[in-house]
Image (cartoon, helix red, strand yellow):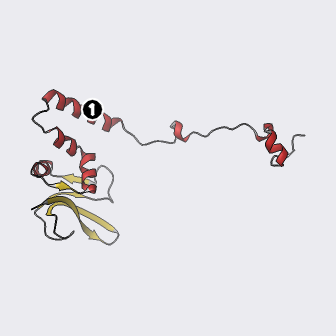
Amino acid sequence: MATRIRLTRMGRRNRPYFRMVIADSRARRDGKYIEWVGTYDPMKSKTDRVTLKEDRIIEWLKNGAEPSETVKNILSDAGLMLKFHLDNPHISDEQRNMQMQKYELSKNTASPATKNSPRFEKVESEPAQNDPELAESGAVSEQDE
């Protein structure tokens, strides 16, 4: 039996709420499921959106359950896909700790672009009066002369 970790929709109209469940891949989206392992509420603030049973999710991933694309993105944001990847007997404890520290640092230092960043600075262009091509076309008014 192929199992998937996927979202089932709950809530009412215009107020979606999702349960993260382990289900047979042949079952309907909101149909029968094997185990409930978390929730996702897109209407809440970013820090409160996701609740996960991490130990159960990692156990199911070890047993071969495949996450859907959306669930994979949620698990990656929570750091569970990295933990699952690092749970390998061929990776030493030092490497595992180093990778987790890198992840924590990148998670804490990453911030969205703000209006003060160079990407959003206004570019000051030269006055159009000094451009001879615009003066010939009549685009620049002759107020100074």
The structure residue drawn at horizontal position 17% and vertical position 71%, both measured from the top left corner, is 31
Q: Amino acid at mark 1?
A: Lys
Q: Whole-percent x and y of residue 142?
A: 87, 44
Viewer-nearest residue: 126 or 69: 69
Q: Which residue is mark 1?
A: 102
Q: How many marks?
A: 1
The structure residue drawn at horizontal position 24% and vertical position 55%, both measured from the top left corner, is 71
- In the rendered structure, the answer to whether residue 49 lies left or right of residue 142 reads left
- In the rendered structure, the answer to whether residue 64 lies left or right of residue 80 reads left
Q: Residue furthest right?
A: 145
Above or below residue 20? Residue 80 is: above
Viewer-nearest residue: 6 or 116: 6
Mark 1: give few (<14), some (14-19) or many (20+) Cα within 10 Å: few
Q: Whole-percent x and y of residue 44?
A: 32, 57
Q: Secondary structure at mark 1?
A: helix
Viewer-nearest residue: 106 or 50: 106
- In the rendered structure, the answer to whether residue 138 lies left or right of residue 116 reads right
The structure residue drawn at horizontal position 30% and vertical position 66%, both measured from the top left corner, is 16
- Indicate the quadrant containing the C terminus: top left, top right, bottom left or bottom right: top right
- Splitting the image into 4 quarters, where does residue 127 fall? top right
Q: Whole-percent x and y of residue 57?
A: 14, 51
The structure residue drawn at horizontal position 63% and vertical position 38%, both measured from the top left corner, is 123
Above or below residue 79? Residue 65 is: below
- Splitting the image into 4 quarters, where does residue 108 fall? top left
Q: Whole-percent x and y of residue 10?
A: 24, 68
- Indicate the quadrant containing the N terminus: top left, top right, bottom left or bottom right: bottom left
Q: Residue furthest top?
A: 94
